[in-house]
Amino acid sequence: MMPEGVDENFHETVLLKEAVEYILPAPGKLIVDGTLGGGGHSKAFLDAGATVIGLDQDPDALGYATKRIGVAEGRFRAVYANFSELDPVLDRLDIGPIGGGFLDLGVSSWQIDTPLRGFSFMREGPLDMRMNSRGATTAADLVNNASEGQLENIFRNFGEEPAARRIAARIVGERENKRFETTLDLARAVESVVPRHGKTHPATRVFQALRIAVNRELEALNEALEQFALRLAPGARFGVITFHSLEDRIVKNFFKTRSAEWIDRPEWPAARPNPARIFKLVKSKPVVASDEEQQRNPRSRSAKLRVVEKL
Ligand SMILES: C[S@@+](CC[C@H](N)C(=O)[O-])C[C@H]1O[C@@H](n2cnc3c(N)ncnc32)[C@H](O)[C@@H]1O
């Protein structure tokens, strides 16, 4: 038997028990899962009796999760949408306040492991990286057309890559002779600038950066946080699982600025009540995977779940 949360075909769900424990799915509650993926979290929310609307911008994920979950007594609905379109999606379905919200950010194992999607520097595939295969811009478009300065900014801002400038220069030099077509073309170019040492592949940060840029991941996250915050009913929980420091920082600050009771400034004589307060933090520290889960699923090692409750 597969261990809990494991789906050998599509995606191994992280922090499954913890998500249920903190989001509090229950009969009569409508939970919006903005990152349906393989449906692991959604299925657990449904098993606890909740109603679930699952969004995903990847038609492959929608197809897989819909088949896995089925109709779930009419309590499940899958919608092809970016989670930054939460408001129009719920308006279209005539839904007002929701009883819970959830995001498990990033890509699924299926996306990473399918060479055609172009996410992996370990597998030869087209330099694509679009989560939404109908999206306009691919990684190849950026690598072949962005200016040297733009590439440097992408690698620095979205990959925190120390060699951003040298890698951008190398790419621009190489593409004068030949377009970058595949993941391995790019991985080799990065490796010629940053040699391998240690366990992390030298192209890790560059691939992360391009993926974030191609999918406008940080903009989508910011937009979604605002919309979820307004949609949650009083007492509803909202949880977000992040996998790297850039997205975790955004979630942490968003939750912090909207849950602080007081704000203070050096020029003020005393602290004032925070007018932006709409949440209480359910836990001040992020929830992380157990040792057992980290052993079993290396991807869970970087997962952080932050949870708030609407006042
Ligand atoms: C880590 S997986 C989710 C896995 C899921 N929780 C499970 O247990 O099976 C992330 C999913 O979110 C989707 N996704 C990422 N960003 C998105 C966005 N802005 N809008 C909609 N879906 C998004 C990806 O296509 C992917 O299928």
Image (cartoon, helix red, strand yellow):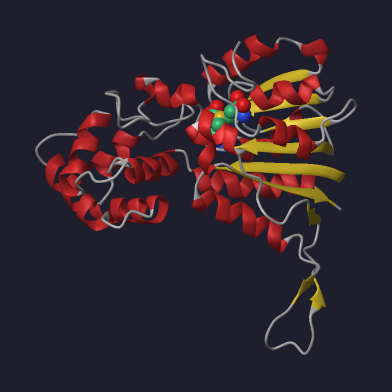
Identity of the residue drawn at 61% across and 19% down? 3
Identity of the residue drawn at 79% across and 43% down? 237
Identity of the residue drawn at 15% across and 40% down? 175
Q: Nearest the camera: 193 or 199?
A: 199
Total marks placed: 0
Residue lying at the far left in this picture: please name it: 177
In the image, residue 147 lies at what x, y percent? 26, 51
User: Compared with residue 193, is residue 40 higher up or lower down, i.e. above or below?
Assistant: above
Quadrant for the N terminus in the image? top right
In the image, residue 180 lies at what x, y percent? 21, 34
Q: Nearest the camera: 61 or 42?
A: 42
- 284 left or right of 130 in image: right
Indicate the quadrant where residue 125 lies. top left
- 258 left or right of 138 in image: right
Indicate the quadrant where residue 124 lies. top left
Q: Nearest the camera: 162 or 5?
A: 5
Identity of the residue drawn at 58% across and 20% down? 6
Q: Is residue 133 visible?
A: no
Q: Nearest the camera: 227 or 184?
A: 184
User: Compared with residue 204, is residue 283 higher up or lower down, i.e. above or below?
Assistant: below
Within the displayed image, which quadrant is ligand 1 positioned in? Answer: top right
In the image, residue 26 lies at what x, y percent? 86, 28
Q: Is residue 62 visible?
A: yes
